[in-house]
Image (cartoon, rainbow, N blue to C red):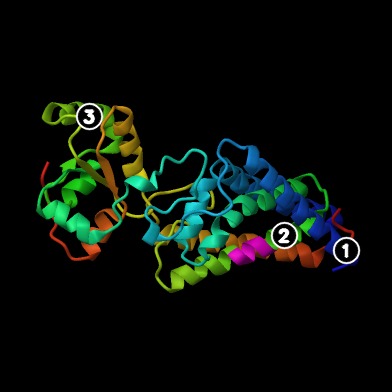
Amino acid sequence: MKNNKIAIIFFLIKLILGITFVYAGYHKVTDPAGFAKILYGYAIFPGFSINILAISIPFIELIAGFCLIFNILSRPALLLVNTLLLIFILMIGFNLLRGHQFDCGCFSFSSHPQTLSNIYLLIRDLLLLLSGIYLWMKTKTGALR
Amino acid sequence: MTLKETKGTFFLIFFALATAFFYNHFSPFGIALFGQWQTSNGVVNAISKTDLVNASIEINNPEIIRRIIQEKKRIVLDVRPLEFYEEGHLPGALPFPLMEFDTVIDKLLEMTDQQSPILIYCSGFECMDSHNVATNLENMRFTNVKVYPGGFRQWQEMGHDIEKNEK
């Protein structure tokens, strides 16, 4: 009975992370130019890397998300998701700390960046990362397939 | 982390990158591998297949822009939304919101002809609305259209005069 509950929790975490990443990746895939401008707005990346990141990141999000949802290479996909979340948190946190106004571009491309909504996004990403780390720690190698 | 998981991770990264660059190459929304992200070269953009940026019509020199404004050498169009125009704009600029192009173009044609020199600006280097309007005007056979890529933000940052509350 207890094992069933844990399995359901694991399944739900994977589903939430998977859907979140597929959704986040999808709208970036449909507008890479917009996402590239968002990356430029972070004022972190050197110019030569912006387009390459704007092309690559959405597909890493999409594929990792699909893998989590459909249980294909789940632990590698979870590792990618956790790594991306950690990078997003560091980027958003860094810009909030230095007071740099930016649009996170997580789900939609807004023309009016808001500090409050970015704090909300930081908290949301932290919660997602904690869920991802929990899943990684609690599932032994091979438990997630 | 096992060797199998490490291999799986690298496989996913490789598969994602291969798919990403393949898709980008054939997608109608694809972008160049390297964009234009230097403000010294004008409006910043990813150089996508759908972009309308024409760097050759940009005047990316604030001093030349200041002289144009001072000497009223060109009709200056502010293509930002009207509320931003009313909060402040370049001296002598006319409101020409991109979203109301079909309405304001008639007014422009009433007051000038297609040979008149025109200067367009929007909010700054990240804004491509001025290029959208420039392309529309050129399609309507306007022959002397220029874009100020630094836009209102650069003008303001340089401490030049700003007009306010004019409709």
- Residue A50 vertical position relative to residue B120 in the rendered view, above or below: below
Q: Is residue A115 visible?
A: yes
Kindly identify which numbered label has been placed on residue A83: none
Marks 2 and 1 sit apart, C-alpha to C-alpha, by 15 Å
Quick one: quadrant of the C terminus of chain B?
A: top left
Tell me the SS state at disc 1.
loop
Q: Which residue is mark 2?
A: A80
Q: Is residue A15 visible?
A: no
Instruction: Give me the chain letter of mark 3.
Output: B
- Residue B60 vertical position relative to residue B109 in the rendered view, above or below: below
Highlighted range, magenta:
A83-87
Q: Majority secondary structure of the magenta segment?
A: helix
Q: Which residue is mark 3?
A: B105
Q: Which residue is mark 1?
A: A141
A86 is within the stretch colored magenta = yes
Marks 2 and 3 sit apart, C-alpha to C-alpha, by 51 Å
Q: Position of residue A104 (x, y in %)?
A: 49, 57
